[in-house]
Amino acid sequence: MVEKHIQLAENSVEKETTTINLGPTHPATHGIFQNIMEIDGERVIKTEMTVGYIHRAFEKIAERRPYSQITPLTDRLNYCSAPINNFGWHMTIEKLVGLEVPKRVDYLRVIIMELARIADHLVCNSVIGVDTGALTPFTYVFQWREKIYEIYEGICGSRLTTNIGRIGGFERNFPDDTWKKIHDFMDGFPAVLKEFETLLTRNRIFMDRCIGAGAISAERALNWSMTGPNLRATGVDYDVRVHSPYSSYNEFDFKIPVGSAGDVYDRYLVRNGEMWESYRIIQQALDKLKGMDSSIFHADAPEFYLPEKADVYTKMEALIYHFKIVMGETDLPPGEVYHSVEGGNGELGYYLVSDGGRTPYRLHFRRPCFIYYQAFNEMVAGGLFSDAVVTLSSINVIAGELDA
Amino acid sequence: MSIDTFLILEKIILVVIIIAASMGVAAYSTWAERKVAAVMQDRIGPLRAGPFGLLQPLADGGKLFFKEEIVPDNSTKWLFMLAPAMFIFTSLMTSAIIPWGPDFVINGSEGARTVALQVADINIGILYVFGVVSIGVYGIMLGGWASNNKFSLLSAIRAASQAISYELALGLSLIALLMLTGTLSLRTIVEQQHGFWDGNYFTWNFFKQPLGFVIFLVCSFAELNRAPFDMPESESELNMGYHLEYSSMKLGMFLFAEYINMFISSAVLATLFFGGYNFPWMDQVQAAVPSGIFSLICVGVLMAKVVGFILFFMFVRWTLPRFRFDQLLNLGWTKLIPLALFNMLVTGAVILFFFNKK
Amino acid sequence: MCNFLWLASTEGIGSYAPVLIQLLIAGAVVSLLMLLTHILGPKRKTKDKLINFESGIEQIGNARKPMGVKYFIVAILFVLFDVEVIFFYPYAVNFRELGTEGFLAVLMFVALFVCGFVYVIKKGALKWED
């Protein structure tokens, strides 16, 4: 312990600190947001988080958009796991109108959502590696994120901002080569994840960098209303998939990995553990799909689900619904609904108020990143500058989700 | 024309060759680094410029020459200019004392003449390297300070603290070796490691000083600012640090000098611990081939060792994460320095009580 | 025979003459590089281009402020200990001649060195997280 013999005056030269801007364009901020950091040598005294650099007013835009056209907005929240956002929104609508989707759609959604979770966690964990200086594991797992993107591509035609699925199901059935890609992924992925863990998990330098960095207690994390891997790293086993199951998650058997210290290393371990669990969930979903009628991929909900194009030209009813859906003239029942899914980053909630019109009266996204980022100062103040950078990547702040 | 004019001429030629070679090796180290990284990361690496991308360093260098030279407004301009020059200058100076090969004899009209493949065999030998390398730190310091940028300044101060911290352990780890050799001259140290197997024991110093070698190697990583000790230019924290504000060839000189330093320190490592240009059965080879060819083979052997070390530096860089700054200082001060002291004392005791044949 | 005889000696200051040659040639190479890049590059200065990088926004305050004192503590410790390390060099070179007596003397020196070293570490000079 260094004793402090001299008490410095408040504004003396000796006490002057350096103000560093970590962001908006800084390699440590993955995306556009800003940290105004007061540092004293290597130590971070405090940091002031600034958001809003890519605020696109999605909640306001959504008030002018028909329900089916809000899905592309949700893509741009957490763009590392866009399908979860899409399905979350679809399920919110289904909850509001009381639409039951077939089991097969649930399982298909589960497969895609868990793939998306794997993609999200792969990015986050490998970027912790990049920020500690280990670039190689990042390139290994990125090839496998690419394979997940190819699976999305086969289903919906796009890769990053997927706009996958429709209200009531999927826009089309999974093609055969996509099934092949899914099975290939399932065959190859465990070896890759194992290799990734071998490279980082027990690496002495990586452990030294991560253990104890950016720690937060369970109590404080709950007070900040943190969710997802960052909360579970502190030891609280809250997972939306278990506590308020959606999309038939209650039929699956999986564990919730939890940490204890709530530091960067625990977050890393929790995310790695979740990837293994996601893998198991996909396996179970694939098993459950066997023997199901493989022609079902959407609910029979003519009001929300676009009819076949051939029917539009031949059937009156199909033409009417086609027109109403495309022009966004489907009125929803008035009411209030909150639906949340376990996003890549935590509880992603949709709070929707409908006044019975064709657009939401008010829509709010509960964006986990926004919540984590508020706690950033508490995590890094008093620690070292390098810790702050690693902490920032470990809480996985994604600018799109931060600013909505 | 006297024979000593030839000496000067000979030295000038040697210096030009060595400087050209170190720059060439440095240039191709950048290519090798990218290829090694590519192989390790399942990528292809540079491919377009020439076969296997072999012309890539030339393209990169040429590009840097034709880039705009930007000197920030509130920088201290002449120091900003001086810093990269100083950094690369010191890195070009260190090669002076490395013995690249054994002497060879030229039979001319004026009689036989021995040519040394070493620029200067000065009596302080390895201390010269330390001295010049410490001046190199000024290049980083000046570059970081003159930029008047917070990241650069932080990086420069980190670099300085790191360099001086590891210089202690570097110096200490070498003392045990010097006890063995009893000289500072690199030439003598190499000659002592003649061949590979001396009937009873391995001649290379690595086998006598394994711990000293490990400490020296770790310290070399730190002195070179290579991963896992690349705190000063940690791209995720400080945006490349002290050369953040540099552009054009001034940036190139910083990067280039680091590769030259890597080349030279590989050569120093090979010379001190891995027998320099010595190789097994060298006596038989020497008897079989003419003196000039033998010298060339020796230079080739040293180069092979150097390339081995350079590749090792690269493998480590693309494998390990980076230390945190306090961990780095702690490793240097609380682990390597005591270890080096311990190594020194044990070496001294062992030599005195077991191998003192006087 | 000639004026350059002193160059041939490997002892004394003469052995440094080739270093001087290297110094001149290296200096020339570096000057050439600096000059070339100065001549060859385009020169279109604009005000924004010459601003310091500060993560894309305006710089807050000056960079040249007093930095954390920890770095300077490391520097001062280096000066202290490096002087002691330098003392080891002449000893190491003459190690065999000095024999057991010299070794005991150095053992004492190392003991003093370690005392100072332990004091510094215990005092927390290298603790960055307080």
Image (cartoon, coloured by chain):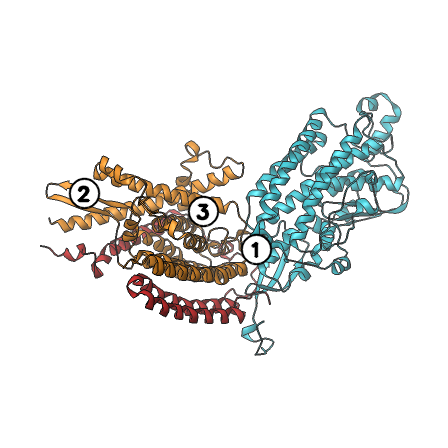
Q: Residues within 10 Å of mark 1 (few under 14, many from 20)?
A: many
Disc 2 or 3, which lies upstream in sequence?
Answer: 2
Element marked by disc 1: loop
Q: How many callouts does the rendering have?
A: 3
Q: Between marks 1 and 2, how big is the CA–CA gap? A: 60 Å
Question: Closer to us: mark 1 or mark 2?
Answer: 2
Q: Residue at x 24, y 39 (%)?
A: B286
Check the rendered structure and report the hue given to chain A.
Answer: cyan
The residue sitting at 61% across, 52% down in the picture is A29
Contact (Cβ within 8 Å) of mark 3 with mark 1? no
Mark identifier at residue C55: 1
Q: Is residue C66 visible?
A: no
Identify the colour of chain B in the image.
Answer: orange
Chain name for mark 1: C
Q: Is residue C2 visible?
A: yes
- The residue beneath circle 3 is B313
Q: Position of residue B15 (x, y in %)?
A: 27, 49
Whether discs 1 and 2 lie on one chain: the answer is no
According to the rendering, which colour does chain C have? red
Q: What percent of the width, then of the height, locates residue A328?
A: 82, 36
> Are the residues under marks 3 and 1 on the same chain?
no
Q: Is residue B80 left or right of residue A95?
A: left
Front-most of B277 and A10? B277
Of residues B217 and A89, which is closer to you in this image? B217
Q: Check disc 2 and report the residue beneath it.
A: B105
Measured along the vertical axis of the image, is residue C107 above or below residue B23?
A: below
Residue type for callout 1: Ser
Mark 3: few/some/many CA within 10 Å (<14, 14-19, 20+): many
**Within 10 angstroms of label 2, few (less than 14), some, or many (20 or more) residues?**
some
Q: On the same chain: label 2 and label 3?
A: yes
